[in-house]
Image (cartoon, rainbow, N blue to C red):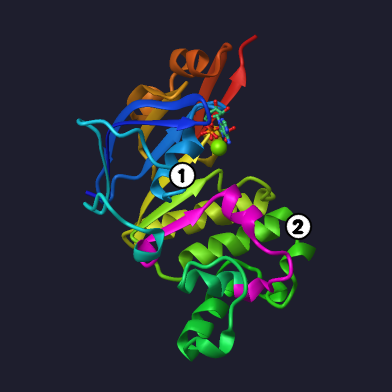
């Protein structure tokens, strides 16, 4: 089991942002947590990153790779994180390639290339090539557009070929081609055995390979099931609080207002 959340609650300040959440993610069970702004999605990820701790309760349990105690440092080879928080934490002076290479020790900031193995540097170049950002590898991060930065953050998460990839709004800031490339890459990662946990408020970010949906509303699980079962007009209208009409085109879901 990759992830186990059992009866987990968490506060953000005085707000109960997650209220008794239980779900599990098994290897190969690609999952999306979908919910409106403020539903608690990023809070869920902060618990995994140990940036936040759940409310202590007898019957609650939170495990990653079967462990109930971990540091992100210990998990760095098995877990890749892509989130707006990681993107914003970066120091603007770091060069593109160093952002990717910093994934090897999960640091954020300066990388001493002379301390890395030649095959690690080569892997950094290979990832930049696959993500179409080779021409930006010596550019300072602060001089990149937000979509360019996002590609480097994605590259950083991929250096170890992690078993579990956690994506929080991964395509925010990407242009059409960037979104297309992202989905292609996610498909390849899934085909090579990685499991994806996606957290988003956008239906179009859900890759066709992701078939398990958890709808999160006001800190609680509102519905759970396959895409066909959960991504219905009625569920999404209730989830987002206005009438929506949902359609599916070549495996991708979209919703438009019915009003
Ligand atoms: N730093 C904070 N202090 C206090 N409350 C917070 C803080 N960050 C978030 N919250 C509250 O916690 C709840 C959950 O926020 P969270 O960031 O997890 O939402 P989200 O589902 O990721 O939303 P979005 O789609 O906007 O990213 C919200 O009610 C929010 O107002
Ligand atoms: Mg969020």
Q: Bin the neighbour count of mark 2 within 10 Å (Cα to Cα): few under 14, some 14-19, many 20 and up.
A: few
Residue, disc 1: 46
Mark pair 2, 1: CA separation? 25 Å
Q: Above or below — where is 137 with respect to 251? A: below
Does residue 108 appear left or right of residue 3 in this picture? right
Where is residue 149? Give x, y as percent.
67, 60
Q: Is mark 1 within 8 Å of ligand 1?
A: yes
Camera-nearest residue between 25 and 90: 90
Q: What residue appears at the point 51 percent right and 51 percent down from the top-left corner? A: 183
Secondary-structure class at tag 1? helix
Q: What residue appears at the point 46 percent right and 87 percent down from the top-left corner? A: 119
Residue 235's disc number: none
Q: Above or below — where is 66 with respect to 136? A: above
Residue, disc 2: 145
Whether residue 67 is in magenta: the answer is no
Q: Assign ligand 1 to one image quadrant.
A: top right
Where is residue 132? Give x, y as percent.
63, 68
Where is residue 204? Give x, y as percent.
55, 37
Magenta stretch in the rendered image: 75-98
Q: Does label 2 or label 1 sit earlier along the sequence?
A: 1
Whether residue 95 is in magenta: the answer is yes
Q: What residue appears at the point 37 percent right and 32 percent down from the top-left corner? A: 213
Does residue 95 appear left or right of residue 161 in this picture? right
Does residue 100 appear left or right of residue 33 in this picture? right
Where is residue 45? Give x, y as percent.
44, 43
Camera-nearest residue between 194 and 24: 24
Q: Is mark 2 within 8 Å of ligand 1?
A: no
Quadrant of the frame with the C terminus:
top right
Camera-nearest residue between 68 and 41: 68
User: Which mark is nearer the camera, 2 or 1?
Assistant: 1
Q: Above or below — where is 103 with respect to 176? A: below
């Amino acid at each position: 089991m990759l992830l186990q959340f059992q009866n987990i609650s968490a506060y953000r300040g005085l707000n109960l942002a997650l209220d008794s959440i239980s779900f599990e993610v098994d290897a190969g069970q690609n999952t999306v947590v979908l919910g409106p702004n403020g539903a608690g999605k990023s809070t869920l990820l902060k618990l995994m990153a140990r940036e936040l701790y759940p409310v202590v309760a007898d019957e609650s349990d939170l495990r990653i790779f079967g462990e109930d105690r971990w540091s992100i440092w210990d998990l760095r080879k098995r877990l890749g994180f892509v989130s707006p928080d990681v993107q914003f934490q970066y120091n603007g002076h770091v060069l593109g390639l160093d952002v990717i290479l910093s994934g090897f020790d999960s640091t954020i900031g300066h990388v001493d290339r002379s301390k890395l193995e030649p095959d690690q540097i080569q892997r950094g170049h290979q990832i930049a090539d696959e993500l179409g950002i080779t021409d930006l590898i010596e550019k300072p991060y602060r001089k990149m557009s937000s979509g360019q930065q996002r590609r480097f953050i994605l590259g950083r998460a991929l250096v170890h070929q992690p078993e579990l990839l956690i994506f929080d709004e991964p395509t925010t800031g990407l242009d059409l081609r960037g979104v297309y490339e992202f989905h292609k890459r996610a498909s390849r990662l899934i085909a090579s055995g990685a499991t994806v946990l996606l957290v988003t408020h956008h239906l179009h970010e859900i890759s066709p390979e992701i078939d398990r949906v958890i709808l999160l509303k006001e800190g609680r699980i509102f519905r759970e099931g396959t895409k066909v079962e959960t991504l219905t007009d009625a569920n999404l209208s209730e989830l987002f609080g206005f009438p929506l009409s949902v359609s599916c085109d070549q495996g991708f879901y979209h919703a438009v207002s019915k009003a």
